[in-house]
Every structure is written in structure tokens, then in C-alpha cells.
Image: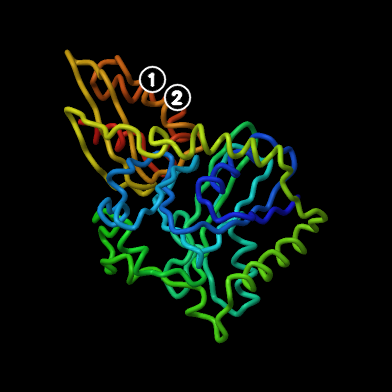
């Protein structure tokens, strides 16, 4: 395993770097970075329904789409992002990758725990959201660590869906998130926190090499920024319009359905949400396009596709029932 600490706070560059590492390195990697104020949205989300557009535009906050699923998160310089890239099987496993983070925090006498689908919490309050994606026998896991972030900015920048709080007693984002420093007897600077966490991971994995990008690699990452991660097409795309729309919360996450039906067939279908899967949701959209709009047909198609690989924690029949 090699260790990389980003030398920039540019969110476009840092998110592009994750894809570059995934596609161009054979070694296992531990990568850490911080971003200036920005909103990072999941691959499958509709950007327009996740952000407070007026606030984001007023404060010139970049919105960047990542390649993993999951929900939108707010980054600032009080938040540290960690990323593991390893060779591995086609299987989501959040607890495996967050375990060393929890252990490092417990060394600081912080009682951190894994919770729900993909969160880390302290006393029931979230301080870390995590996401994963699989590509060509490699797994990328990344997560946030709110050390000293401005929680007011978090709540103002994101447009959180009421569905997220269905059946919960806590009704606001601010009341259910926390920072690590709130639970330390002696709060840490972000620089000290980076040093402590990196030393723990380096020792745990017997890392021998701290890697620095060459000028050529930096240029290649920047090209990925210019052609993909900084573009409107990647980050926003066109807001979907459809003859049938639905939004449902499943155990595996929220799904937004946008379906156009013509003469009894699905002419177009788009699926958005904070769900996870090891395969790309575009496979389902392509498989259902131009097929009969009936439950039996759709269930058969999705069953043959091995549906569980696309929408983890979402029962097939429940998914299909909510398309009508």
C-alpha cells in the first residue's frame, strides 16, 4: 500500500484524482485530501434536487459529482476526506474499510461507531458519511471526517429530503450531525489530525512509501478535470422530466423514478437517488428502455440482470411496484 496526501484543496482535482488512481495504479492506496467549500454529490443523484440552489450560487460553491453512489455531502477545510483503493471482490463492505478509522479515533478516546448503511457516529450523531464503488476487480472506499467543519454551512447548502427523516425522532440535519472536536478534551488542529490518522494507517498497513505525483501525472489528472469533473454535463446534466415520477425511501436508500411511457412501452427511464450498488444503474435504464410497461415483464428483465448488484438493500418486487 502507498500513501498519498493531496497538495491542493481544489475539489474538482481531488475527486478526479480518485478516478485517476483507480484507473492507473496497481498498488493498494491510502489517499487523503481536503476540499475548499464544495458539495460532492453521489453518481446517481439529481443535482437539482439535492442542493439549495440560491445559497450555492450566492456563495459560489462548486458542485462536483463523484463516481460512487450515496448521498450529497458538504466539504470545507475543517473536513478531512480519506480514501482506500484495494483489489477485491465485487461486494460492498463499509464496515471493513471504516474499522481502522474507528480504531484510530478510539485511540483519541472518541467513542466512534459504525451506524446504519454507511455512517460513523459519536453518541448517535453523524460525523462521517461513506461511499464505495467497484471497477475491474478494484474497490474504492471514501469517506468524510468532520473535525471542525462549520455545521451551519452544511445545513444551508444542502436540500435534505423529508423522506430521510421518515420514522425518525430527529427532524433536522443540524441536530443529527457533529464534529470530532466536540468530543475531544483538547480539540485538534486539522494538521495534527491528519498527522495522527496518517501515522496510524501507515503503521497498521506497514506502508513504506509516501507517493508524490509527477508533473506528467498532474497534467493527466488536470485533463480529467477539464474534460469531465468541471463540466456542467457531468455535474448537473439535464433535469429529467417524465410522464410518471415517484420518490420512495427503501432500506437501501432513496430512489427517484422518472419514466416516460408511450403506447404501453417505456420510452425513457431515469433513476436517481442516494442508493449504492456495485454495478452501474445505467444498465437497468438501458434494459428497460423500449420494453412493455408491465410488472411481470420488468421483474423478469431485472431478475435476469441480477438486480441485487445494482440497488443494494432494495427488494426487486418493491422496486417494480413503485414504478406504477
Residue at the right extreme of this rendering: 208
Residue at the bottom extreme of this rendering: 185
Front tag of 2 and 1: 1
Q: Total of numbered circles in the picture?
A: 2
Q: Disc 1 designates what residue?
A: 287
**Residue at the (45%, 69%) spot, across then down:** 149
N-terminal of the two: label 2 or label 1?
A: 1
**Residue at the (34%, 38%) spot, across then down:** 272
- For label 1, the SS is helix
- For label 2, the SS is loop
Q: Position of residue 171 (x, y in %)?
A: 26, 66
Which quadrant of the figure has residue 188? bottom right
Q: Disc 2 designates what residue?
A: 305
- In depth, the one of 182 and 59 nearer the eye is 59
For label 2, the crowd category at 10 Å Cα-Cα, with few meaning under 14, some 14 to 19 and many 20 or more, is some
Q: Is residue 108 left or right of residue 307?
A: right
Image marks 2 and 1: residues in contact by CB distance under 8 Å: yes
- In depth, the one of 69 and 233 nearer the eye is 233
**Residue at the (20%, 29%) spot, across then down:** 242
* Mark 2 to mark 1 CA distance (whole Å): 9 Å
Q: Position of residue 233 (x, y in %)?
A: 39, 32
Q: Position of residue 154 (x, y in %)?
A: 37, 63
Amino acid at each position: 500500500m502507498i500513501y498519498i496526501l493531496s497538495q491542493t484543496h481544489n475539489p474538482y482535482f481531488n475527486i478526479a484524482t480518485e478516478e485517476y488512481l483507480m484507473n492507473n495504479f496497481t498498488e493498494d492506496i491510502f489517499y487523503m485530501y481536503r476540499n475548499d467549500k464544495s458539495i460532492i454529490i453521489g453518481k446517481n443523484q439529481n443535482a437539482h434536487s439535492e442542493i439549495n440552489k440560491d445559497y450555492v450560487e450566492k456563495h459560489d460553491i462548486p458542485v462536483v459529482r463523484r463516481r460512487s453512489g450515496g448521498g450529497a455531502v458538504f466539504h470545507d477545510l475543517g473536513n478531512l476526506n480519506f480514501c482506500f483503493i484495494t483489489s477485491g471482490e465485487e461486494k460492498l463492505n463499509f464496515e471493513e474499510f471504516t474499522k481502522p478509522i474507528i480504531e484510530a479515533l478510539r485511540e483519541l478516546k472518541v467513542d466512534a461507531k459504525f451506524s446504519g448503511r454507511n455512517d460513523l457516529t459519536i453518541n448517535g450523531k453523524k460525523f462521517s458519511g461513506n461511499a464505495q464503488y467497484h471497477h475491474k476487480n478494484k474497490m474504492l472506499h471514501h469517506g468524510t471526517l468532520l473535525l471542525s467543519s462549520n455545521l451551519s454551512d452544511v445545513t444551508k447548502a444542502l436540500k435534505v429530503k423529508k423522506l430521510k427523516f421518515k420514522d425518525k425522532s430527529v427532524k433536522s440535519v443540524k441536530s443529527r450531525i457533529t464534529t470530532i472536536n466536540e468530543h475531544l478534551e483538547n480539540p485538534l488542529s486539522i494538521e495534527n489530525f491528519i498527522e495522527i490518522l496518517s501515522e496510524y494507517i501507515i503503521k497498521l498497513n506497514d506502508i513504506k512509501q509516501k507517493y508524490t505525483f509527477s508533473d506528467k501525472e498532474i497534467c493527466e489528472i488536470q485533463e480529467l478535470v477539464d474534460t469531465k469533473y468541471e463540466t456542467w454535463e457531468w455535474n448537473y446534466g439535464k433535469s429529467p422530466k417524465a410522464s410518471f415520477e415517484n420518490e420512495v425511501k427503501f432500506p437501501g436508500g432513496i430512489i427517484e423514478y422518472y419514466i416516460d411511457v408511450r403506447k404501453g412501452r417505456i420510452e425513457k427511464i431515469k433513476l436517481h437517488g442516494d442508493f449504492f450498488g456495485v454495478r452501474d444503474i445505467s444498465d437497468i435504464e438501458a434494459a428497460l428502455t423500449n420494453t412493455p410497461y408491465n410488472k411481470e415483464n420488468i421483474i423478469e428483465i431485472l431478475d435476469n440482470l441480477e438486480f441485487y448488484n445494482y440497488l443494494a438493500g432494495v427488494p426487486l418486487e418493491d422496486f417494480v411496484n413503485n414504478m406504477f
